[in-house]
């Protein structure tokens, strides 16, 4: 069916709601936008779906949400009566249409005879993850588009363990969603109201009780500033910190209420300095030690630490290193460091965390990019009990300290960061001081990312050709430094270049390459899973700050030039 036929089909639908009819009438005046809205179905991938809000098969709207929900309902039904009885939990963030999309999903599940729990107001993604586990539900859904611009929304799917679906289960769900042919034909009225249960305070209290277990110390005095960036985490974090005994925290008033327009920020992304502008104003007024910003669905946290008269924004890798040091040092001091302790990080995350963990005798294991792979390890450990989980993180500002949630959790991490800042303050140190001590002890680890946009079908082909070429003609050296090892996650092999031997990589298949150089540097080439980009990740280590910065810039420039010259 062509995009023109699809739009005619929507216009002819007798029960199309009035708002969609009006939007379609406007859309028809712009052929390019109309084509983009209808030329395909909105992609439902391993993590769910995400797109611009608006009319069309390639947009987030009540009809595409019904379609996804019907497919998931069919998947749940295929698993039997017990799965339908255990049901599904639905949460949503502060974005445009999030409550409406959550309600449509809930009614669709209930209309299919599935027990459905729907939150009464915006809640965070990690609380959704916790709730699936707490209620012993079969699945979960959270309506969110994380830190994307206001015109976007999304739909993320979780399994019974509270983690995003593993690849095998995700493929099965994708197949069921793909079988739903007509999004306009799905009716979700007339459900049994007893199947749709509104939840709120009881689960809030249970989640707070668990979040308090991340503490290693009782509260010490500290001044901090917190902002949820107009997202879902504000009330939860405030309640948690107050119950933990931290009463000298300033909450940015202009950004505490959920607001999907994000009126005070250009982008609600804690990776970007602009997200901290208002927090810094309050930090200067209160002479705060620490600023914390959390993204709209409450799963990623960024921090800025006082550095003289100003604040220094730390990277996800640096924050992860500080959290590992604090947790492990505290457990060691109390004699609670387990012999089978383990930390997880993704393959594009710094080696800094690994060397810190190993200095405490703790294993650090790599997983593919995406927190669901950490969740998958935790699920396996529920059965085989091979390790004690201590921490999991990724360079993109996602961290988990206690696995009552099975996705990255900025709420529990906010408490831990405030606690760490307070503890080190008793020693006359800031978190920045501790970071510099870690560099002095373990070496200066620096990382960077270069993203190259390749739009459209031809762009996707270019990215695939690049990865294929790097496999056919692998680098023997990069920037004049010999390549020591190449990890190919597609063939699941690790090649030792100097020895000419291979060994198996026990990670899922993925179109990613990673090069390890003889000087300890590394480069990872990875197509983005959500954007038309190929990403180059870089990591170096050196004995001093300036040397590490120079080495990083030289490696980046040399690699990009060598790739472009192929």
Image (tube, rainbow, N blue to C red):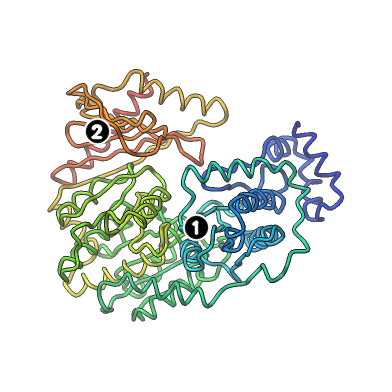
Q: Which mark is residue 445?
A: none
Q: Is residue 126 above or below residue 467?
A: below
- Hey, which quadrant is residue 428 in on the image? bottom left
The residue sitting at the front extreme is 81
In the displayed structure image, the side of residue 411 where residue 103 appears, left or right? right
**x, y percent for residue 234:** 48, 70
Pick the front one: 36 or 384: 384
Q: Is residue 90 visible?
A: no
Label 2: few (<14), some or many (≥20) within 10 Å?
many
Assign a secondary structure to mark 1. loop
Q: Nearer the viewer, residue 42 or 396?
A: 42
Which residue in the structure is indicated by mark 1? 160
- Residue at 53%, 77% (x, y): give it: 201
For residue 461, side relative to residue 325 (left or right): right
Distance CA(mark 1)–CA(mark 2): 37 Å
The residue shown at (22%, 27%) is: 496
| Quarter of the image that includes the N terminus | top right
Picture coordinates of residue 213, whole percent (x, y): 33, 72
Residue 399 place in picture, x, y as percent: 36, 57
Query: In the rendered structure, which disc, 1 or 2, sits on the residue that comes first in sequence?
Result: 1
Quadrant including the C terminus: top left
Q: Secondary structure at mark 2?
A: strand
User: Residue 193 occupies which quadrant of the picture?
Assistant: bottom right
Compare residues 202 and 191 and report the one nearer the observer: 191
Residue denoted by label 2: 516
């Amino acid at each position: 069916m062509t995009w023109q036929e699809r739009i005619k089909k929507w216009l002819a639908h007798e029960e199309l709601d009035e708002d969609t009819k009006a939007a379609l009438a406007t859309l028809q005046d712009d052929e390019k936008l109309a084509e983009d809205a209808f030329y395909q179905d909105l992609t439902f991938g391993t993590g769910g779906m995400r797109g611009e809000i608006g009319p069309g098969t390639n947009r987030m709207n009540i009809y595409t949400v019904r379609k996804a929900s019907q497919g998931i309902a069919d998947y749940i039904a295929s698993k039997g009566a017990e799965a339908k009885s255990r049901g599904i939990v639905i949460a949503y963030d502060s974005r445009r249409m999030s409550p409406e999309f959550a309600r449509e999903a809930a009614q669709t599940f209930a209309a299919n005879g599935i027990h459905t729990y729907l939150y009464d107001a915006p809640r965070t993604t990690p609380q959704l993850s916790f709730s699936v586990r707490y209620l012993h539900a079969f699945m979960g859904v959270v309506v969110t588009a994380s830190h994307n611009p206001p015109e976007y929304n999304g739909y993320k799917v979780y399994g019974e363990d509270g983690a995003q679906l593993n690849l095998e289960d995700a493929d099965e769900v994708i197949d069921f969603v793909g079988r739903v042919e007509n999004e306009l034909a799905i009716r979700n009225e007339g459900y049994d109201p007893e199947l749709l249960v509104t939840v709120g305070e009881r689960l809030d209290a249970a989640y707070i009780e668990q979040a308090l277990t991340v503490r290693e110390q009782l509260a010490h005095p500290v001044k901090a500033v917190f902002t949820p960036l107009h997202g879902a985490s504000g009330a939860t974090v405030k309640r948690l910190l107050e119950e933990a005994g931290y009463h000298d925290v300033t909450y940015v008033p202009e950004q505490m209420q959920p607001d999907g327009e994000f009126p005070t920020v250009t982008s609600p992304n804690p990776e970007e300095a602009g997200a901290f502008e208002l927090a810094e104003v309050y930090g200067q007024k209160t002479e705060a030690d620490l600023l914390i910003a959390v993204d709209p669905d409450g799963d990623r946290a960024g921090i800025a630490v006082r550095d003289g008269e100003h604040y220094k924004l730390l990277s996800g890798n640096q924050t992860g290193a500080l959290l590992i040091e604090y947790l492990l040092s505290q457990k060691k001091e109390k004699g609670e460091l387990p012999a089978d302790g383990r930390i997880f990080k993704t393959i594009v995350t710094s080696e800094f965390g690994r060397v810190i963990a190993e200095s405490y005798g703790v294993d650090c294991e790599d997983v593919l990019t995406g927190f669901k792979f950490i969740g998958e390890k935790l699920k396996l450990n529920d059965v085989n009990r091979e390790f004690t989980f201590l921490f999991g993180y990724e360079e993109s500002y996602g961290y988990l300290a206690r696995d009552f949630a099975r996705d990255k959790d900025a709420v529990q991490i906010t408490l831990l960061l405030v606690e760490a800042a307070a503890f080190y303050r008793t020693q006359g140190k800031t978190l920045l001081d501790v970071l510099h001590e870690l560099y002095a002890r373990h070496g200066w680890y620096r990382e960077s990312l270069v993203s190259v946009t390749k739009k459209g079908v031809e762009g996707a082909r270019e990215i695939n050709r690049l990865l294929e070429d790097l496999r056919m003609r692998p680098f023997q050296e990069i920037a004049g430094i010999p390549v020591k090892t190449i990890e190919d996650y597609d063939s699941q092999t690790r090649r030792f270049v100097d020895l000419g031997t291979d060994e198996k990589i026990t990670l899922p298949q993925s179109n990613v390459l990673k090069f390890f150089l003889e000087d300890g540097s590394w480069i990872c080439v990875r197509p983005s899973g959500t954007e038309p980009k190929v990403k180059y990740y870089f990591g170096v280590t050196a004995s001093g700050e300036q040397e590490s910065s120079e080495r990083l810039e030289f490696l980046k420039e040399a690699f990009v030039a060598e790739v472009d010259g192929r």
